[in-house]
Image (spheres, grey):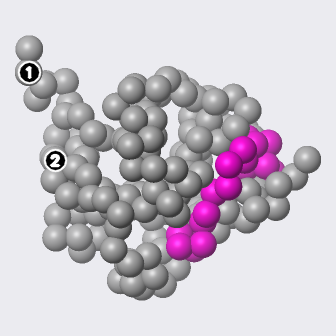
């Protein structure tokens, strides 16, 4: 059965309408693949999310989206999160920042070997995380997910919370 709220959320995110990408709970992978047909043909890989290192599946596409890559994180049946790397918000970052208002939390994240101490702007009640560059001048990544709490987002969904292996202690 098609969930129009889910289809609309994935479509909005892919089109750069980030503030309108509220992902409802229990969005099926089928709905996402009907929204973006290229996802139906993308192979699954395995990754982990959050401080609990939750192992999940993901698949990605890099065409017909308002960004460099769209990644769908899922458990085989339901979407856990939809992520866009180097997103291009339809009205730009400043307009998106105004639309979202202040984040409920600002967390650190690692982008490669660089740590951004307050660059992960988290809006858990909206189901959105925005990853910014130093000075908050550009967006590196956005992640849409079903509404949750900061603690559950951090434990089960957040990305880049730990430094690369070569920077970790013994």
Q: Is residue 27 magenta?
A: yes
- Which residue is at a point 8% across and 21% down the rendered structure image? 169
Ranked by sequence position, the earlier of labels 2 and 1 is: 2
User: At 42% from the left edge and 58% from the top edge, which residue is drawn?
Assistant: 129
User: Would you name the residue on which mark 2 appears?
Assistant: 115
Q: From this view, report whether residue 46 is shown above or below residue 109.
A: above
Circle 1 Cα neighbour tier, 10 Å, few/some/many (<14 / 14–19 / ≥20): few
Q: Is residue 39 visible?
A: no
Secondary structure under tag 1 reads loop
Q: Residue at x 43, y 62 (%)?
A: 123
Which quarter of the figure is the C terminus placed in?
top left
**Residue position for label 1:** 169
Q: Is residue 29 left or right of residue 131?
A: right
Neighbourhood count class around disc 2 (C-alpha, 10 Å): few under 14, some 14–19, many 20 upward: some
Q: Position of residue 49 (x, y in %)?
A: 43, 33
Label 2 to label 1, Cα distance in Å?
Answer: 16 Å
Q: Position of residue 132 (x, y in %)?
A: 28, 63
Magenta region: which residues? Answer: 15-34
């Amino acid at each position: 059965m098609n969930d129009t709220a889910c289809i609309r959320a994935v479509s909005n995110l892919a089109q750069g309408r980030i503030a309108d990408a509220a992902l409802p709970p229990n969005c099926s992978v089928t709905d996402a693949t009907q929204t973006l047909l290229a996802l139906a043909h993308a192979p699954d890989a395995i990754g982990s999310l959050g401080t609990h290192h939750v192992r999940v599946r993901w698949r990605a596409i890099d065409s017909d989206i308002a960004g460099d890559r769209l990644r769908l994180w899922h458990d085989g049946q339901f979407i856990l999160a939809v992520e866009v790397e180097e997103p291009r918000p339809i009205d730009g970052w400043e307009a998106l920042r105004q639309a979202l208002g202040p984040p409920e939390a600002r967390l650190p994240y690692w982008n490669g070997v660089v740590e951004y101490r307050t660059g992960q702007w988290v809006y858990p009640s909206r189901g959105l995380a925005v990853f910014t560059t130093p000075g908050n001048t550009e967006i590196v990544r956005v992640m849409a997910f079903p509404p949750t709490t900061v603690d559950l987002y951090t434990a089960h969904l957040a990305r880049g919370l730990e430094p690369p292996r070569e920077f970790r202690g013994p």
